[in-house]
Image: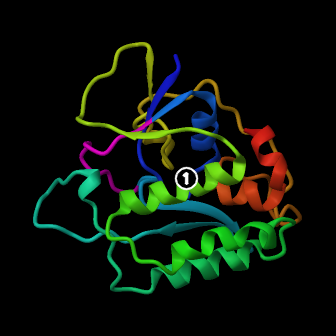
Amino acid sequence: MSKVILNTAYFPPVQYLACVNRYDEVGIEQWESYGKQSYRNRCEILSANGILSLTVPVKKTNEVKFLTKEACIDYSTRWQKLHFKGIESAYKNSPYYDYYVEDFIPFFEKKEKYLLDLNTAILETVLGILQIRRSLVFTTDYQTYPEEVCDMRGVIHPKPARQEKEDNLFKAKPYTQTFADRFPFAPDLSILDLLFNTGPEAVDYL
């Protein structure tokens, strides 16, 4: 298989980037019904108090269901400032924070209308840092894919009980994290955790 289909994700977890790195062609699903409590609008980082979830608020609609490509970001709260402060507090003392943070600051200043656009810009930036050259293609409809396409939609999820199947090709290997003196290794956090802690070695880890 040379193609993978993934959900969109906000500062996606390490497993997500390992999957992107594994395939030649990457499709991002935009025609699915938007799923809450997923990586679509949240990421997990390791703070001084343990694992911290950062969630991008999405505007409520009159529709019970709406498409992922229609999900609009809600800026009625100062979530961008809170997210950046959380990331800064968690990683300012990590080995590569100063080296990469400037690449991510624009995502906490610019106000993208759609969640899909924000996530795609973040993913493209991360791939650029990792020097992983992949063309991201958006799906043109919602469909069932043939066996030669790896369908990872609904597989990479923050709640294991809601995973549709397991990714048998991914196994999180420990690396030194910022608060290793306080907590045991926390696997599969946001790619930010891997980048800020391992720097140029991140792509080898993937």
What are the residue bounds of the magenta stretch?
27-37
* Residue 81 at least partly seen: yes
Give 52 or 78, whichever is nearer the viewer: 78
Magenta stretch: dominant secondary structure: loop
| Residue 96 drawn above or below residue 188 | below
x 37%, y 62%: residue: 115
Taking the spot 28% from the left edge, 67% from the top edge, the residue there is 72
Task: State whether residue 189 appears in this view.
Answer: no
Residue 24 left/right relative to 138: right
**Quadrant in which residue 89 is drawn:** bottom right
Q: Residue furthest left?
A: 62
Position of 95 with respect to 193 (left or right) is right
Which residue occupies 63% across, 82% down? 85
Q: Name the residue beneath numbered marker 1.
A: 124
> As drawn, is 173 to the left or to the right of 170?
right
Percent x, y of residue 108: 53, 77
Depth check: 32 or 182 in front? 32
Mark 1 belongs to which amino acid?
Glu
Residue at 59% x, 60% y: name it. Answer: 44
